[in-house]
Amino acid sequence: MKIVKVNVIPLVGATVDGGWPQGHEKKENLHTLLEVLTDEGLTGVGSVFTSGALTEGAMGLLWPLLKNESAVEPERVTEKLRQSTFWQGRGGAVEHAISGLDIALWDIMGKACGQPVSRLLGGNYRDRIKPYGSILFDEPDVLRTRLQDVVARGFKAIKMGWRPFGRRDRKFDELLIRTARDTVGPEIDLMVDAGGSEQFWPHGLNWARETAKMLADFNIVWFEEALPPDDIEGYVELTRQSPVPISTGEVLTRRQSFIPWIERRAVDIIQPDCTKNGGLSESRRIAWYAFDHNVQMVSHGWNTAIGVAADLQLAAAMPVARYVEYLTPCEYIEDLTTTPFEIDAEGYLKIPTKPGLGIELDHDKLKKYAL
């Protein structure tokens, strides 16, 4: 089975607020889908966490290497792409595009075999997992309403991130966390993402350590991106001292970038994003390496329904997995597939068992968002 075409589908019109200092518009294009077509009629779909323009540019580079390649050998094919394009920049937009291709090829492989991707990744350790609703911080009154809405949608775990947390003073940060815990009660899992990958992040180890102590008082599950993403020395020390588990990893690409973070125990939880770090092939390698070093893996999933489906398949195939990220509300997750995801009464998502990623794009719905 050969690859004969790749459709690049930028998503616009429903991009959610990412907390960027420069602001946000729904018409922004931050996510792109890739449809991989084969000579036998099977089609696979992947998700890329970067713009359509950058994905188109990357595909111009990759297509001569991809054309007529096997559609059922995702690891070999995407590693060939990676090894053959290193001079264009290891990581970045090229690796992001490879990520979407890899996910799509696993989707095809599953359909060709009549099996869910999770089984092809090694087998199923679970058939459901808890999603955490991923939202932004806001002023206390707005945050309270937003949290109530997320709980009403069935989530039993919620992550709050970025502005205004960490941008004013410690007293205000504690007010936000106290508001959140008082709103949702003791039974809802709460995570905090400081957003340390924001440009010109002003805080260092002392701020992160003292903030972690405050978060521990409110039973926060983990403290994410408390420092800039290149400060591995700071993370090593923070993880050693923090009473709350420390997590990061969403900006890293390629499995090799994750090795020092795992080997040095710079985090308690590593967070690869399969829509940018090389796809399911790389994420599986990262997850097993983390498992062998007793580091928890939780996929970063600020993405689309295709990204969520890929994260679910990966979570099923990992021995230890507790959560998947679920951006909410988000039309790119909730309005792109023929069958929407559903959270059960206990706050879990069932992992799709149909062949491939287990979901299908609804092309009529997609027309609303395709550029």
Image (tube, grey):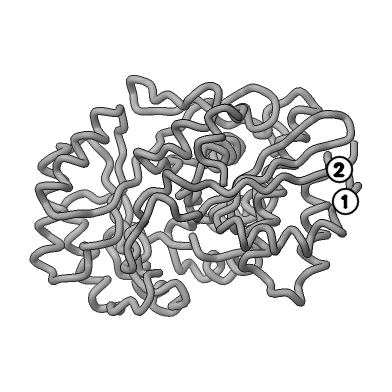
Q: Name the secondary structure under disc 1.
A: loop
Q: Is residue 284 left or right of residue 339?
A: right
Q: Is residue 89 left or right of residue 2?
A: left
Q: Position of residue 100 (x, y in %)?
A: 66, 49
Q: Position of residue 141 (x, y in %)?
A: 10, 47
Pick the quarter of the image with the N terminus: top right
Q: Which mark is residue 225?
A: none
Q: Residues within 10 Å of mark 1 (few under 14, many from 20)?
A: some
Instruction: Tell me if I can see residue 119 in this picture.
Output: yes
Q: Name the secondary structure under disc 2.
A: strand
Amino acid type, mark 2: Val
**Picture layout, residue 39 above or below residue 17:** above
Instruction: Tell me if I can see residue 298 in this picture.
Output: no
Residue at the spot 35% in from the left edge and 46% down from the top edge: 134
Q: Give yes or no for contact between labels 1 and 2 (Cβ–Cβ under 8 Å).
A: yes
Q: Residues within 10 Å of mark 2 (few under 14, many from 20)?
A: some
Q: Which residue is mark 2?
A: 4
Real-space CA distance between mark 1 and mark 2, rounded to the nearest whole angstrom: 6 Å
**Picture layout, residue 258 above or below residue 114:** below
**Earlier residue among tags 1 and 2:** 2
Query: For residue 110, which quarter of the picture?
Result: top right
Amino acid type, mark 1: Lys
Residue at the spot 78% in from the left edge and 50% down from the top edge: 75
Residue at the spot 30% in from the left edge and 27% down from the top edge: 154
**Picture layout, residue 259 above or below residue 29:** below
Q: Position of residue 172 (x, y in %)?
A: 10, 63
Q: Is residue 43 left or right of residue 236?
A: right
Query: For residue 256, which quarter of the picture?
Result: bottom right
Q: Is residue 53 left or right of residue 326?
A: right
**Picture layout, residue 256 above or below residue 36:** below
Q: Which mark is residue 67?
A: 1
Q: Nearer the viewer, residue 167 or 182?
A: 167
